[in-house]
Amino acid sequence: MNIIELLIDEKNPLSGIDAVSIVHDPAIEENFIALKKHEVELKQIDSEKRILMGAALIPNKQIYRKNKDEEFYVFFSEKTVRRASELFLQKSNQNNATMEHEKQLTGMTVVESWIIEDKKMDKSAKYGFDLPVGTWMISMKVENDEVWKDVKDEKIKGFSIEGYFADKIQNSSSVENNEIINQLKKLLNGEI
């Protein structure tokens, strides 16, 4: 089965992550957690912070994909994860969010973004995540009441990225590599 590395093409202005989608079954197989406000001394505050925290991209994690009859894995290197996270913010995409890669959402903002550099000392470990160094973590503020209800009803459980990437086949036993690459590009660009 082919293993395809997804890369940032610095020459292509469209390359990178355009939006974060909230989904029921994240491809990276990591759920986020919903953070609630703690009680503040002298004030009884039970309203929720409405912040979701989770992995946006995990380096070197092979993600299974199927496109018609073709099965393959994609992955992002640690270097690509870091660059994708930087470009996401540099291009001011922190307010771009979708539901299940389909419906555009309002009232959603990435308010924190960081790369795990130390598994034990990282903020993610404080919240119970056990993720590798190089993982891109985000916290997203949810002002959208419908979305927050779906979070509480466990209809959505994680993040999934949307964007454009170049690719490089790592292992291939197929002579139809160009067709696979073209199909992968169509899949990633939402054309399939």
Image (cartoon, rainbow, N blue to C red):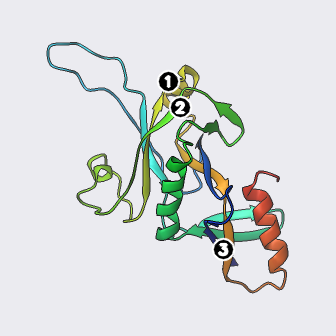
Left or right: 10 as drawn, with respect to 51? right
Q: Which residue matches tag 2?
A: 108
Mark nearer the N terminus (1 vs 2): 2
- Residue neighbourhood size for the residue with mark 3, other residues' Cα within 10 Å, grouped as few (<14), some (14–19), many (≥20): many
Q: Which mark is residue 4?
A: 3
Q: Residue at x 66, y 74 (%)?
A: 4
Quarter containing the N terminus: bottom right
Name the amino acid type tagged 3: Ile
* Residue 35, horizontal then vertical, whole percent: 36, 34
Separation of marks 1 and 2 at Cα, in angstroms: 6 Å
Question: Which quadrant of the structure image shows residue 165?
Answer: bottom right
Mark nearer the N terminus (3 vs 2): 3
Q: Which residue matches tag 1?
A: 143
Query: Which of these two is toward me, 148 or 57?
Result: 57
Q: Dots 3 and 2: beta carbons under 8 Å? A: no
Separation of marks 3 and 1 at Cα, in angstroms: 36 Å
